[in-house]
Each structure stands twice: as structure tokens, then as C-alpha cells.
Amino acid sequence: MALLEVHYQLNRPVRLEARFQVRGFTVLLGQSGAGKTSLLKALAGLLPAEGTPFGGLPPERRPVGYLPQDLALFPHMTAWENVAFPLKGRDRKARALALLGRVGLLEEAHKRPGELSGGQRQRVALARALARKPELLLLDEPTSALDPLTKHQVLAELAALIRKEGLPTLAVSHDPELAGLADWLVVLEGGRILQEGPPEEVLAAPRTASAARLLGFENLFPARVVEGGVEAEGVRLRLPLPPWARPGGRVYVGVRAAEVIVVREDRPPPPENVLEGLLESLYPQGLAYRGRFQGPLALTLLLPRHVQARLHLAPGRRIKVVLKPRYLHLMPGEAKEGL
Amino acid sequence: MDPLFWDALFLSLRVAALASGILLLAGAPLAWLLAFRRFPVKALLEAVFLLPLVLPPTVLGFYLLLFLGPEGPWARLFGASWAFRFEGLVLASVLFSLPFALTAYREAFLALDPNLLEVARTLGVPRHRILARVVLPLVWPGLLSGTLLAFAHTLGEFGVVLMVGGSIPGKTQMVSIYLYDLVQALRFAEAVRASLVLLGLSLFLLALVRALEGRWRSWRSTTS
């Protein structure tokens, strides 16, 4: 897999030192304002910064394909003219059309950007960036221009297309959904790289509470280590303790909304970590239901619709939920962590 | 119609055309600098360029007359006075319409999406090609409408050109001054006809500017 070592340092507009790897389709997650766009611009040579690769080169001489958040297609040119813009020579139209064919947009070649959908515009921008024969592709918030209904499919196609090109790609985002498509996942926070690794590893085991929040852990509680588990807001939860957890130590415990399980009354009750309370609200979100549980702990739930239907769940019902030990994730509590 | 009217009108048109041409060539780069570059004394410089907007035209005209007159620094430097001459009228018109043109040009440049220029650079395209194929196609309606506005504005100027050019019939008598002289001489019927021609011309120019602005907005709306 295409691999690239990145080490960049910038002072303006944010202070940032980032050292990480780009492996295949790499997603860098960070909160808004963490400096993600600045890092991409620095890599493209559009912001003053020091680092490798490409340090010191002007943007014109960096082999980088940069797709900003709004894609910046030239509004007065058709799709093929956009793609041909970086090309020279008599056959530029033929080469531009070939590139549009590679991204599956040959039929839209004579349309202006205003006549294309968000996903099509993204692919025109990709073809234009490919025309420059880049060694690294930079995508700024590729999910932002997309229709929420088709977002996942469009992104999956984009990622597949990029993999086919075999180009190392760095996509920055604050959207955990993108993380699922990555070959390599990097977490940026507080001006440095907090964590990097294969996505399944990083997603399952964020190193800090704020990384967990970025990675989609909606339920996070400060807790204290006790014998055989933790105590969070007066509630004892059993879970296997990692070696670093010392009794009495301050930690954070997190669980994903989709991994809070509603107990079925017709089945034997689970042995541990059962909480009883009120289902305060429940509303559809896409094909699932998002709910709010008020009990000893306040939890956000995400239920598939078949669960909602089978258990006749509705706001105002008293329910029991279980926090299974294997879905509870423990992170060291940091003294200055602001949650 | 009085042949002097046509003389005056064509003089005004020639002065306005030349002045707005100069404004386009010199004003557009200047507006680019003011829009995108930071440098010391920029605020002061902008104030100086905008001054003709608020300064009584006769004051501007008077200073220009002193500057261009036979005893003025211009004559001493170049050996010839530009007062009461076509060249003087053009220079006065350029200064008088500068704020209009600069403001319109700057707005055209500021409406450019900076992302477009940045991405164009990352595509490895040299700057002159970015200027020719991205910047100019996107800003020309704005530049042209600013230039037309300056042209129309120059046609109507009175105080400055009266001071600098006097009112020599057939030589420096611009159409607005000609009209004033008609009224002074109580030749109202001719004044009505001359005014109608100017009214029609101004209306036509403004309609053209609006049409260009409409086109320009439609470019801009597809940018975002």
C-alpha cells in the first residue's frame, strides 16, 4: 500500500505539529478549528510551514492534488475544460475526456459545475487533480458537499476510485462516518497527533475521552476505578480492567450509542450492568431510532428499527438497558480534560 | 441641430472614451493591489484616490489648473501646458472618475473566490495563465461595468472640465458646458433637444451596466 511519512509544523493561523503516516486512503479526524484545513493548505504549499514532504516548494511545484471543501471548480468552464485546465498540448481535450472516463463522468463532460450534483462535482475535481499527476491527494471535508441521503454511497465510491488509482490520500474531516472507509486513521487534537492506526483499532480503543468523542462515542462519563470495574456517577459498572487502571484512579468510561442494549423482558436477565429508567425521547434517524434514556446514568441510544418495533418502544416507557462489559471502553482521565 | 452641439458631444465622447480606457488599464491593476495586498500607508492612499468623490469639483479643477497651467510644475517639467487643451481634459476626467472605477473594479476582484486562485496554483499552472483563463473571464463583466460607469460619469462632469478646459467652442467645450451656455443665452428649445440626447445616452449606458451586472451575478452564484 502506498505509504508516505508526513511531518509538518506550522505557527499560523494555528500552532500545530503533526507527524503521522499516510497509508492508502487515510482519514484524519479533528474537531472544527483543530487546524485540519491549515494542515492541508500547508501540505499544498498555500500556507507558510516547515516540513516533509515538499517543504519549501511553491504550490506550483508540489505534486499534490488539493480538493478544498467547496471543490473550487471553475464555474465558467465545463467539466472537461476544468479537467483540461492543468494540461498542455494539442491532445488536452482527449486526455481530459479520458480522465473523466476514469471517474465515470464521460457523459457529463460538457456540463458546467452548476449543473452537476455534489458527488459528480467531487469526481470532476478529482479528475482535475489527477490530471496534474499528483503523488499525494488532499481532501478537505469530503462529506460536507454531499446530500445526507446518498452521502455514504458517494463516499464509498470515491474511496474505491482513489484506491484504484493507488494514490496516497489524506482526507480531513470531523465526521466519524468517514473513518469507517479509511485504510488508516489519524486523530488530531490540541495541535498534535493524538493517535494513529488501522481504523478498527483506533475506533475501538480511542486513547482519550476527547478522541473518543471525535470517534463517535456519544456516552462518556468521568469515573473512578474500583474492584472489578468502575464507579461512574454513583453507578457501579463491572468490566475487565486494563493493566494501567489502578484502584481509586480517575478514568473515563465510554460506550457507543449503538452499543447500549435494551433488555428484552421475555429473556433471562443479563448478569450485570443493568440500568432501569425512563425512555425520555425517541425519534427516527434514517433507518434507525435515536433515543434518550434517563436512569442512574443518562444515555443516548441508537436502535435498529426492528428492535424498536419488536419491543414496542415509545417515549415515556420504563425500560431496562444493559452496558455489556466488552462494549465499555476505559480511558485514562486527564487532569485538564474539558468535556 | 447646432453643429456646435455635435462638436461638444463628440469631444465629450472622445474624452470619456480615452479617460475610461486609461482607467481600465491603470485602475484595474491598482484596484487589484488595493483589494489583495497589504502595505504601509494603504489607508491614506485609498483616501487620496477617493478624494474626488467628496471634493468640490471646482476645487479639484482649480488645483489641476494650477498644476497644468503655463506656470505650473507640469509645464516646467514637460515644457508644455496642458491647461485649456484636450489632454488636460482627459487627465482631469481620469482623476475625477477614478473613485467610481476603483470601487467597481475592487468589488469585482473581491467577489472572486480566493479558493479558485489557490487551487489553480496547486494545479501547477503559471500565473499568467491563471490570470488569462480564470481571473479575467470571471471579472470582466465587473471591470466592464465599472468602466462604463466611469464613461457615463465623465460625460456629465462640469466643474472640473470647466476649470481645466475653459469653454472654448469646438476645442474644449464639453457637452455639459455647451448646455449650460445655451441656457445662459436663453436658447431653451435647443437646450431641450440637447438634454434629451444626453438623457437617452445616459439611460442606455445605465441599462448596459445593469445587464452586465446581472450576467456577473449569475457567474458568481455558480462559484459557491
Image (tube, coloured by chain):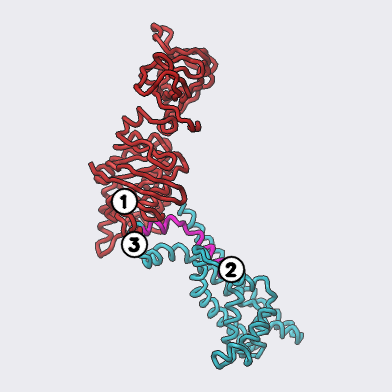
Chain colours: A red, B cyan
Q: How far is mark 3 from mark 2, CA to CA?
A: 32 Å
> Which residue is disc 2 drawn over?
B46
Residue B194 at least partly seen: no
> Which residue is disc 3 drawn over?
B125
Q: Residue furthest left?
A: A1
Estimate the x, y position of residue B139 in percent, counting from the top left.
47, 64
Q: Chain of mark 2?
A: B
* Mark 2 crowd level (few <14, some 14–19, many ≥20, 10 Å Cα): some
Q: How far is mark 3 from mark 1, CA to CA?
A: 23 Å
> Which residue is disc 1 drawn over?
A52
Q: Chain of mark 1?
A: A
Q: How far is mark 1 from mark 2, CA to CA?
A: 41 Å
Estimate the x, y position of residue B54 in percent, counting from the top left.
67, 71
- Label 3's element? loop
Residue A331 at least partly seen: yes
Examine the rendered structure and indicate whether residue A193 appears above or below residue A279.
below
Estimate the x, y position of residue A97 in percent, counting from the top left.
28, 54
What's drawn in magenta, residue-wise? Answer: B100-121
Which residue is depicted at the point 44% across and 32% down?
Answer: A210
Which residue is depicted at the point 43% across and 43% down?
Answer: A191
Examine the rendered structure and indicate whether residue B196 appears above or below residue A139.
below
Q: Chain of mark 3?
A: B
Q: Looking at the picture, tell me which residue is in the foreground, A255 or A86.
A: A255
Q: What amino acid is found at the position of numbered circle 2 in the picture?
A: Glu
Q: Is residue A9 left or right of residue B184?
A: left
* Mark 3 crowd level (few <14, some 14–19, many ≥20, 10 Å Cα): some
- Label 2's element? helix
Discs 1 and 2 carry the same chain letter: no
* Mark 1 crowd level (few <14, some 14–19, many ≥20, 10 Å Cα): some
Discs 3 and 2 carry the same chain letter: yes
- The quadrant in which residue B137 appears is bottom left
Q: Is residue A242 left or right of residue B3?
A: left
